[in-house]
Each structure stands twice: as structure tokens, then as C-alpha cells.
Image (tube, rainbow, N blue to C red):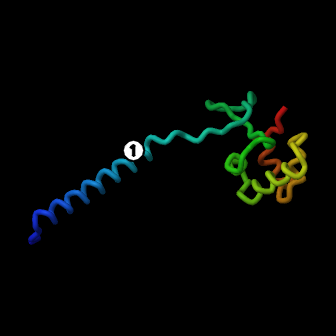
Amino acid sequence: MFDLKRAERSILIFLLAALLIGLCAAAYQKFRREPETRIGRFNPESEGVFPRYKVDINNAGQKELESLKGVGSAIAGRISEYRQSHGAFASIEEIKNVKGIGPALFDKIKDDITAGE
């Protein structure tokens, strides 16, 4: 069916081997990934098996802020901008001064945030 020369067969075998090695490496990386860690303060009032950590709104990065319920990239960016222009949050209630964080969103995230010590 295929009338390949020796050099062509060698190239084909090499390419198939490279593809197989690449697929194995990708599968290995997928299953070896470490779970993402949330940096924050331990919440001793948490329920359940796993401890609950609070996000420190004065030090959290973009991704950590986005991990909060209802907070997307736009609001996370506004929180960072607010911190830069007004300084650290004195209390968690001050986060309501950020555009896009009203009473409803604050109620969703208030148990998951802290303003540091």
C-alpha cells in the first residue's frame, strides 16, 4: 500500500515517536499539577472538613481577588486601583467604596475577606 523508502520510513517513525512523547508529557503534566493555594488568614469559624481561608484585600493579587464569589477581573482591577490611590483598607466595609461592590456583593464576600491586622 505504502511504498516508502528507508529514509522516509525513518522520518515517519521519528515523527510518530515525537508525537507520542509529547502526548505522554502533556498527560503527565496534567495529572501532576499542584492544586492552587489560596493565601490568606485561617477562618476558625469555618465549617466542614477543610479549613477556610480569608482573602486579605490589602495584599491579594488579581487572581486571588477573582477567586471571591461574584468578583471578576474588572472588579478585582478596581479593588487594586482603589488600594493604590487610597491606601490600605481600614476595614472590610470600606471595600463597598469600590465601584461595582454594593450591599449584595458585599454580603456574598464578607465572610471570605479580611483587611489584615
* Residue 3, quarter of picture: bottom left
Q: Residue at x 14, y 63 (%)?
A: 7
Image quadrant where one finds the C terminus: top right
The furthest residue to the top? 44
**Of residues 65 and 46, the one drawn nearer to the viewer in this rendering:** 65
Image quadrant where one finds the N terminus: bottom left
Q: Residue at x 72, y 46 (%)?
A: 61
Q: Is residue 92 above or below residue 3?
A: above
Q: Position of residue 99 (x, y in %)?
A: 86, 59
Q: Residues within 10 Å of mark 1 (few under 14, many from 20)?
A: few
Q: Residue at x 74, y 40 (%)?
A: 55
Instruction: Report the number of numbered marks.
Output: 1
**Of residues 70 and 91, the one drawn nearer to the viewer in this rendering:** 91
Q: Residue at x 87, y 43 (%)?
A: 89
Q: Position of residue 34 (x, y in %)?
A: 52, 39
* Residue 56, quarter of picture: top right
Q: Which residue is mark 1?
A: 28
* SS label for mark 1: helix
Q: Position of residue 93 (x, y in %)?
A: 89, 45
Q: Amino acid at mark 1?
A: Tyr
Q: Is residue 90 above or below residue 45?
A: below
